[in-house]
Amino acid sequence: MDETWSALDTTNQGFLSKDEAKKFIATTLQELGIPGDLTEDGLDSILDELDHNGSDRFSKSQLIDFFSNFMYFFADPTS
C-alpha cells in the first residue's frame, strides 16, 4: 500500500484526489488478490461514504481504515 500511495501522491501533499483514490483502491485490491470488479459507480459510492466533509480529498489514514474494515468483512463470511 505504501508504494501505491507514493506512486499516486507525487506531490507529497498527504492526500489523494478522488480519481487518484479510485486508482489506489483498484491497485490495492489487485495487490491483495481480491477480484477488482468494482464499477465506477461502486468506487464513487465507497468514496462518497469516506468523504465526510465533501472535499474530494482522501488521506492515507482514511483509505487504510477503509481497507481494514473491508478486509474484516471480506474475511468473515458471516458478516
Image: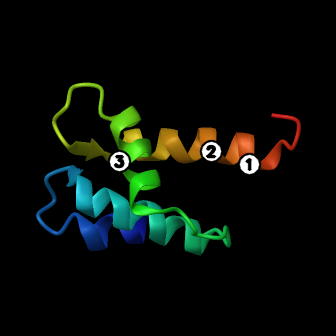
Q: Residue at x 80, y 48 (%)?
A: 75
Name the amino acid, label 1: Phe
Tell me which corner region of the image, top left, top right, bottom left or bottom right, holds residue 25.
bottom left
Check if mark 3's residue and mark 1's residue have beta carbons within 8 Å.
no
Q: Residue placed at 57% from the left, 69% from the top?
A: 36
Badge 2: residue crowd in 10 Å (few <14, some 14–19, many ≥20): few
Q: Position of residue 69 (x, y in %)?
A: 61, 38
For the residues marked 2 and 1, what is the alpha-carbon distance in whole angstroms? 6 Å
SS for callout 3: helix
Amino acid under label 2?
A: Phe
- Residue 59, labelled with which disc? none
Residue occupying the point 29% across, 43% down: 59
Query: How far separated are the C-alphas under marks 3 and 1?
Result: 20 Å
Instruction: Kindly indicate whether the residue at mark 1 contacts the one at mark 2 (C-beta within 8 angstroms).
Output: yes
Q: Report the residue marked by disc 3.
A: 60
Whole-percent x and y of residue 72? 72, 41
Q: Quadrant of residue 17?
A: bottom left
Which residue does the numbered mark 2 point to in the structure image? 70
Measure the alpha-carbon separation of dots 3 and 2: 15 Å
Q: Residue at x 26, y 63 (%)?
A: 20
Q: Give how far across and how far down residue 1 sits, in percent.
A: 47, 63
Task: Identify which residue, 62 or 25, lies in the foreground.
Answer: 25
Camera-side mark, 3 or 2: 2
Q: Residue 76: x percent and y percent?
A: 83, 42
- Crowding near the residue tagged with mark 3, few <14, some 14–19, many ≥20 C-alpha atoms within 10 Å: some
Nearest to N terminus: mark 3 or mark 1:
3
Q: Secondary structure at mark 2?
A: helix
Side of 66 where 35 appears, left or right: right
Secondary structure under the numbered disc 1 in the rendered image: helix
Q: Which mark is residue 74?
A: 1
Query: Which sits in the foreground, 4 or 37?
Result: 37
Q: Amino acid at mark 3?
A: Lys
